[in-house]
Amino acid sequence: AGDRVPADVRILYCTDGMEVDNSALTGESMPEPRVASTESPSQPPTEARNLAFFGTTVLKGNATCVVHATGDNTFLGKIAQSIKTSYVKSTLEIQIEHFVHFIAVIAVFVGLVSFVVKAVQRATMGQTIQYCASALFSQVPEGLLPTVTISLMFASKEMVKRKVLVRKID
């Protein structure tokens, strides 16, 4: 009792009334009973009574176990990997991406219109390229990134004043 489980284990033998604290994994505050069994459980791992997981604590009793998984292969390790690899774009990121695509389409359109205008005027190739490049690049908003960054900074500052935890500003 009182020991942390060092790996995901299958319980082969345990004292009657063995209990573990799975709150680190499941959030369940009540101790969960464990029993000895060598068979593979048919229910989900968190429901199985013959398994104990890395990061949990034995509250009562003791057991003889066989190691089932270690490191990143443990139940806790898999949870950590899924959190680390899952990334969902925020609504703001999606809207900024759409805006940038919209501006890019407008810039290309303006560049093509400038090319046609200079072609009709029978300008030299150098003048045409210079005019088209100027028209194309003038459509790119230089202040967009600083404006968005400063706006996010002020918004997060207001949220902190209201005791909201700002985890990631993007």
Image: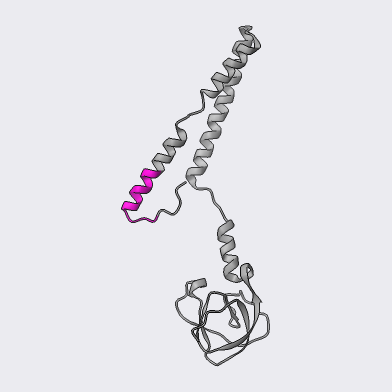
**Residue most extreme to the top:** 122
Q: Position of residue 102 (x, y in %)?
A: 54, 32
Residue in the picture at 54% in, 24% down: 137
Q: Position of residue 143 (x, y in %)?
A: 44, 31
Residue in the picture at 36% in, 55% down: 164
In the rendered view, would you say 165 is above or below 7?
above
Picture quadrant where residue 52 is located: bottom right
Magenta region: which residues? 153-165
Q: Position of residue 156 (x, y in %)?
A: 38, 48
Picture quadrant where residue 116 is located: top right
In the rendered view, would you say 100 is above or below 10?
above
Is 40 left or right of 79, judged from the image as shown? right
In-front residue for pair 118/3: 3
**Residue most extreme to the left:** 161
Residue in the picture at 61% in, 13% down: 128
Q: Position of residue 62 (x, y in %)?
A: 55, 89
Q: Main secondary structure of the magenta part?
A: helix
Residue 67 on the magenta segment: no
Is 102 left or right of 126, judged from the image as shown? left
Residue in the picture at 64% in, 6% down: 122
